[in-house]
Amino acid sequence: MQRTLIWDLPTRLFHWSLAASFAIAWLTGDGDAWRSVHVFLGYLMLGLVGFRVVWGFMGSHFSRFASFWFSPKEAVQYLKQVATGRAARHTGHNPTGSWAIYILLALALGVGLTGILTLGGDEQQGLAAGWFSFSQIKLIKELHELMATAMLLVVLGHITGVVVESVLHKENLARSMVTGIKLAEPGTPVAHRHRVVAAVMLLVMLGFGGWWFKYAIDRNIDHPNGSVMEAPREGDAAHVKFVGPKLADNSVWRAECGSCHSAFYPALLPSRSWQKMMATQDQHFGSDLGLDAATVATILTFLVDNSADKHLTEAAFKIEQSLAKDSAPQRITETPYWVKKHREITAADWANPLVKSKNNCAACHMDADAGTFEDGAMQIPKALAATAVPLAIIKP
């Protein structure tokens, strides 16, 4: 037995890049504040899977699929042999490990593709923006989460197998995937290092990361159908750029409704709420609006055409879904979805000078005036950071 280069450099770089990408993607899956990182890692995983498929035919001997193609029966038999402590040592991938690799590649592909579809339907952003409605994407989103969980279980099983086989054959398999070196018999095919391929692979990943976090996000490439907005505000930590879908506007509505308070975009309440509100304009929260019939008709048409029922934004869809069919709330803050998203905010938070009240959406939502309420447009003012950091993303 002699020290032999078994794993070429591109294979090792792929292995650890995919492992790190999945681990971080898993940790950032539930936080809207980290969505840009999560999406980036999803695209990166798809690229890595594509590379590995190509490298499975063009790489060094033990990196090629032909060197570790075993039948399911052989994989099960090897697993039984491991359980009895009589499993044969394999220089390359063993039968059970080979199937773990195939399953991980398939799941990574599935997770990435369903992630793109979920982003397109759940956020109406990315490559699949507009392909599905918010309601249609529910099943795909559940499939995305299910496949991610399955991938995690396979990863844990793979790690367990590496540990068990390392102990069984008294060799550090994890270290060999770092160095590429394993003990092998004379005459065993020696891997070519393929330094150039690895260097190009690394540069592509770094370049994509640089483009994504500098160019794609700053210029909102991930939101091709949206409107770009820049909102530097006093007290903000940074000059934040964000984007949301271009929503219809109406000068009469904005002038009349915005003259006394913020012009709350119609997508925040269902059409029945607006109809009830305009039908009782003489009792508008203790005031008589005194609008003539023509003005009422103009405003009502705009309100109904862009209400929560139309699902123009993610917030609109979730607000409408949270309401009973016969419910016609007159306050946005009374909708179940709004209450759920703001339940952790204390009275002291609302009393903060930068917020003052629950109807001051613009205090935290920089696109409140546009009515889009995008995740990337949420930024808690500095004065709130000490008490409301966990609420980094809050939608109305």
Image (tube, rainbow, N blue to C red):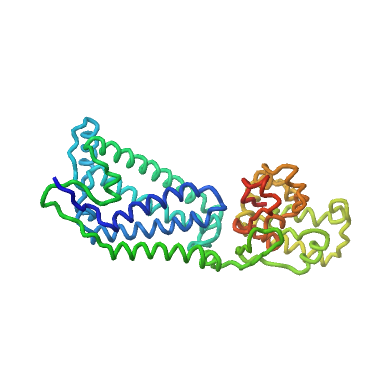
Q: Nearer the viewer, residue 375 or 338?
A: 375
Q: Nearer the viewer, residue 244 or 190?
A: 190
Number of labels in the image equals 0
Q: Nearer the viewer, residue 178 or 207?
A: 178
Q: Is residue 78 visible?
A: yes
Does 12 appear above or below 247?
A: above
Instruction: Give the quadrant of residue 14.
Output: bottom left
**Residue sitting farthest toward the top:** 84
Q: Is residue 324 visible?
A: no
Q: In x, y percent, where is residue 104?
A: 34, 48
Q: Nearer the viewer, residue 129 or 294?
A: 129
Does 45 appear above or below 220?
A: above
Residue found at x 30% / y 57%: 52
Q: In x, y percent, where is residue 224?
A: 54, 67
**In the displayed structure image, the side of residue 307 where residue 88 appears, left or right:** left
Instruction: Give the quadrant of residue 371.
Output: bottom right
**Residue sitting farthest toward the left:** 187
Q: In x, y percent, where is residue 141?
A: 49, 50
Residue found at x 19% / y 44%: 90
Q: In x, y percent, where is residue 47?
A: 38, 60
Quarter of the image containing the N terminus? top left
Instruction: Give the quadrant of residue 293.
Output: bottom right
Residue found at x 50% / y 49%: 29
